[in-house]
Amino acid sequence: MQININKPSVENANKFALFNLGFRPFFLGASIFAIISMVAWMLIYLSYISVSIENISVSQWHAHEMLYGYGMAVVAGFLLTAVKNWTGVPTVFGKPLMVLFALWCAARVLFLFGTAQLPWVAGADLLFGLMLIVAIAMPIVKAKQWKQLAVVSKVVLLWVGNIVFYLGCFGVITSGMQYAINGAVLLFISLILMIGRRVIPFFIERGTDTRVQLKQSKWLDISILVFFVALFINAIFIQTPYLTALFAWTLFVLNGYRLINWHAAGIWRVPLLWSLYLSAWFINVGFFFYGLQALYSSLFILTLHIFTIGGIGLMALSMMSRVALGHTGRDVRKPSRWLGLAFAGLVVSLLFRAAVPIYASEFYVSWMLIAAILWTLSFAVFVVIYTPILLKPRADGAFG
């Protein structure tokens, strides 16, 4: 039986809508897990609790769950929603979406208790990734929008990276965990660059008080793509420091020029815009420090958290906030005023996690704890505001 999920229905007004479209469960799950995982990490790091973790370091466990756990949930929610819009073909909903979400949840819950159930964790996590690839690829193939498969390729590479991580855990691939973590950071940045190129200028042009038309350059887009691929290949496989620095600094210049062209004065009055724009700049600053890191390894922690907290974290929180409003039939111009504080909290979290310890390293643990608290509070604000929005049907009565 074919169901037209685009048809508005008054009957949906009071129904449970969590599994009507992919962004609903995965955005809610990602935000809750961002809190749980961070709290668990700090309790373990500060030795308040003990979890049996073997064959990998505790920091690798934390990095994996932030990237392949939290990060993949955001990607799943966004792409299951975006692909439906791009192709006009429905993506999974109802029971299939429940199964997909349940696999993600199972992997996260089991891994919270360490590596004792690692085969089950790996099985659930990799099956989730495979099903997600199929779920986003099928509508694209059906609609014959072959260019959109470029997005799918990034998800495939992330899935392969997750396989490498687990093979490293089982001792099959030496340093597999490190390859997987370093590769995932760059792949998430790649996804943000690709999707951000489509949506950030679009949002800015339509979200400011005064009408603006932002400058776009195809040569710039192609150049950024070429140098990013070169950076990825060299940083992960060849590992020539001077080439990494060259490619990263070239990306800093090219992407910085593009971001300058995307600037409009009105964005700083709109939290859903300045957060997107600022996170894009954090990624760009991350390129600069990635180049320095290749030459001075002591900058690794700084670079990693510029990318992950300032780039991936802030971009994800901002994008989830906007998408959840727009795709539940609500006005994206009237978000909760608390969101600005949540975005600012992540910015300050980045400062305490990456910048402040450089100048006052004797209080490193304290700065780290403050950063974790601010991260947790920022996502707690999202959970409080958006849980009823994600659970309830669209405001216009349509399905989705």
Image (cartoon, grey):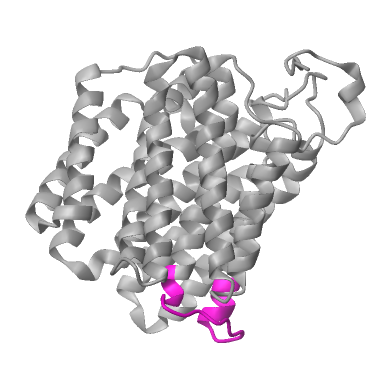
Residue 325 left/right relative to 286: right
Instruction: Give coordinates of residue 169: x percent, y percent.
Output: 41, 70
Q: Which residue is drawn at 36% across and 67% down?
A: 168
Q: Is the C terminus in the top left, top right, bottom left or bottom right quadrant?
A: top right
Position of 77 compared to 336: left or right? left
Instruction: Please identify the quarter of the rendering in which residue 219 is found.
Output: top left
Q: Residue 82: where, in percent of width, then height? A: 55, 26
Q: Is residue 64 left or right of residue 113?
A: left
Name above or below for residue 275 compared with residue 161.
Answer: above
Q: In this picture, is 297 found above or below 398?
A: below
Q: How many marks?
A: 0
User: Where, by quadrant of the figure, is residue 218 drawn?
Assistant: top left
Look at the picture and state if 19 lies above or below 73. above
The reply, left or right, for residue 322 in relation to residue 213 is right
Viewer-proximal residue among 316 and 26 = 26
**Residue 187 appears in which quarter of the rendering?**
top left
Q: Position of residue 180 (x, y in %)?
A: 35, 58
Along the viewing direction, whichever of 66 and 383 lies nearer the viewer: 66
Spot occupied by residue 381 in the image (x, y as percentages of width and height): 68, 51
- Of residue 282 and residue 149, the one placed in the foreground of this image is 149
Q: Which residue lies furthest to the left in this view?
A: 242
The residue sitting at 25% across, 34% down in the picture is: 255
The quadrant of the picture occupied by the N terminus is: top right
Which residue corresponds to the image point at 16% horizontal and 50% vertical from the top-left? 234
Q: Check residue 264 for magenta coloring.
A: no
Q: Is residue 319 visible?
A: yes
The residue range painted magenta reads 40-60
**Is residue 270 visible in the rendered structure shown here?**
no
